[in-house]
Image: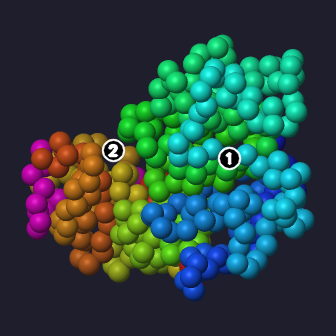
């Protein structure tokens, strides 16, 4: 979060859009129940969850594309009405599919401007500026029908940005793309949204995508927001067992700080010492977690390489869960369970199997902690 985008550090953040007591009921079934949600000016808020969690419904309600059964949406602190054309024109959207029109790239990007009566030099200037911002400078005369999937989605983003919206909605904009292109465009979209400083709500089911693009994440389940915070907090220290399972982690561990010295805390978790970079004082009760990708696994009995990693736990492989390009390995250390992620090649090289003895190594900086009651 930057001072420029959010105001000075000592100023109260400006809320650009908010929802209060939002409920949507379809055929007597509640599909959305969100008592409160707010997005600061210039912030990208990612709605993360599985299919059917209510993400797109919440996006449509906040974006005035759908009326809630009850509750209200506020823009800049004032109730927003779907009936107000002026209000709806403050919002632009990018969807899963670009839905480009026949014709040139410029014709597609300028479509919304034409609908608002903006033509000629001003339109040309704004189109050129928008295409430059999405990495397509000079593409005005290209045919929209010849674009690749990534290029088409960049044009769709330019078509939204050219309107200079106060609120930008992005509904699974990269979900249909292949993994390589998706990684590339995720980084690009994150950069563009950060540089534009436009208030944005970004729907995705991909936690890596959310971590890259978002300033703040809300995890949704069955129409409710069940976890909310900055990406490191939400994805690094799960709020409960369901959230932990959804993001591929074991539930957070409970511990107590036994010593704290110069920013390094020693934490007791059921008799096991963990080390974390934290200023929490001795005696503090806390929750603790480690992201799977931050843990390195070695065979038991091998000489460990010299490392600055303070945490080294003897463990037993309790579960193995193959994923796409990685394998999640659940490790048990005398009843304390953590999950590690290793490549398929590393899993094969280590000969990982249930009951195998291993050593888990991770740095103090990888241990996320939060004070608890």
**Which quadrant holds residue 104?**
top right
Q: Name the residue under label 1.
A: 93
Task: Tell me what residue is drawn at x 81 percent, y 37 percent.
Answer: 115
**Which quadrant holds residue 105?**
top right
Q: Does residue 275 appear anywhere in the picture? A: no
Above or below for 313 versus 223: above
Relative to 233, 292 lies left or right: left
| Mark 2 vs mark 1, CA separation in Å | 48 Å
Q: Where is residue 132 in the image (x, y as percent from the top left)?
A: 69, 21
Task: Tell me what residue is drawn at x 67 percent, y 29 percent.
Answer: 108
Q: Position of residue 95 (x, y in %)?
A: 58, 46
Element at label 2: loop
Task: Tell me what residue is drawn at x 85 percent, y 37 percent.
Answer: 116
Task: Tell me what residue is drawn at x 36 percent, y 51 percent.
Answer: 293
Q: Position of residue 170 (x, y in %)?
A: 62, 48
Q: Nearer the viewer, residue 158 or 218?
A: 158
Q: Sequence-wise, which precedes: disc 2 or disc 1?
A: 1
Q: Where is residue 158 in the image (x, y as percent from the top left)?
A: 68, 32
Q: Name the residue under label 2.
A: 307
Element at label 1: strand
Q: Is residue 354 in the magenta section?
A: yes
How would you rate the neighbour count of disc 1 (Cα within 10 Å): few for under 14, some for 14-19, many for 20 or more?
many
Magenta segment, which residues?
349-363
Colouring style? rainbow
Relative to 82, 272 lies left or right: left
Above or below for 371 versus 232: below
Relative to 117, 286 lies left or right: left
Looking at the image, is mark 2 or mark 1 nearer the viewer? 1
Q: Nearer the viewer, residue 137 or 4?
A: 137
Above or below for 354 versus 197: below
Q: Is residue 258 in the magenta section?
A: no
């Amino acid at each position: 979060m930057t001072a420029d985008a959010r105001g000075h550090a000592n100023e109260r953040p400006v809320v650009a859009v908010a929802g209060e007591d939002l409920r949507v009921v379809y055929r007597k079934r509640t599909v959305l129940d969100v008592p409160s949600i707010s997005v600061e000016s210039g912030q990208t808020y990612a709605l993360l969850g599985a299919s059917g969690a209510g993400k797109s419904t919440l996006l449509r309600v906040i974006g005035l594309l759908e009326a809630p059964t009850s509750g209200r949406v506020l823009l800049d602190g004032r109730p927003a009405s779907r009936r107000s054309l002026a209000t709806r024109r403050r919002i632009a959207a990018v969807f899963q599919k670009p839905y480009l029109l026949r014709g040139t790239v410029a014709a597609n990007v300028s479509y919304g401007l034409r609908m608002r009566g903006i033509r000629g030099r001003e339109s040309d200037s704004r189109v050129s500026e928008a295409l430059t911002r999405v990495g397509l400078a000079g593409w005005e005369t290209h045919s929209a029908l010849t674009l690749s999937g990534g290029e088409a989605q960049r044009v769709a983003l330019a078509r939204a940005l050219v309107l200079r919206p106060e609120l930008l909605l992005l509904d699974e904009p990269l979900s249909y793309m292949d993994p390589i292109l998706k990684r590339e465009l995720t980084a690009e979209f994150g950069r563009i949204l950060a540089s534009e400083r436009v208030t944005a709500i970004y729907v995705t089911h991909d936690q890596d995508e959310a971590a890259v693009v978002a300033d703040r994440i809300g995890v949704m389940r069955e129409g409710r927001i069940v976890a909310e915070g900055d990406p490191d907090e939400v994805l690094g220290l799960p709020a409960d067992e369901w959230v932990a399972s959804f993001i591929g982690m074991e539930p957070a561990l409970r511990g107590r700080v036994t010593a704290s010295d110069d920013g390094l805390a020693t934490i007791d978790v059921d008799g096991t010492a963990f080390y974390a970079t934290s200023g929490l004082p001795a005696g503090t009760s806390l929750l603790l977690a480690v992201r799977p990708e931050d843990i390195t696994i070695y065979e038991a009995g091998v000489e460990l390489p010299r490392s600055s990693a303070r945490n080294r736990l003897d463990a037993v492989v309790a579960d193995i869960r193959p994923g796409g390009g990685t394998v999640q390995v659940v490790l048990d250390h005398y009843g304390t369970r953590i999950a590690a992620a290793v490549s398929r090649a590393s899993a094969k090289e280590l000969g990982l199997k249930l009951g195998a003895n291993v050593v888990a190594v991770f740095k103090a900086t990888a241990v996320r902690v939060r004070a608890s009651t």
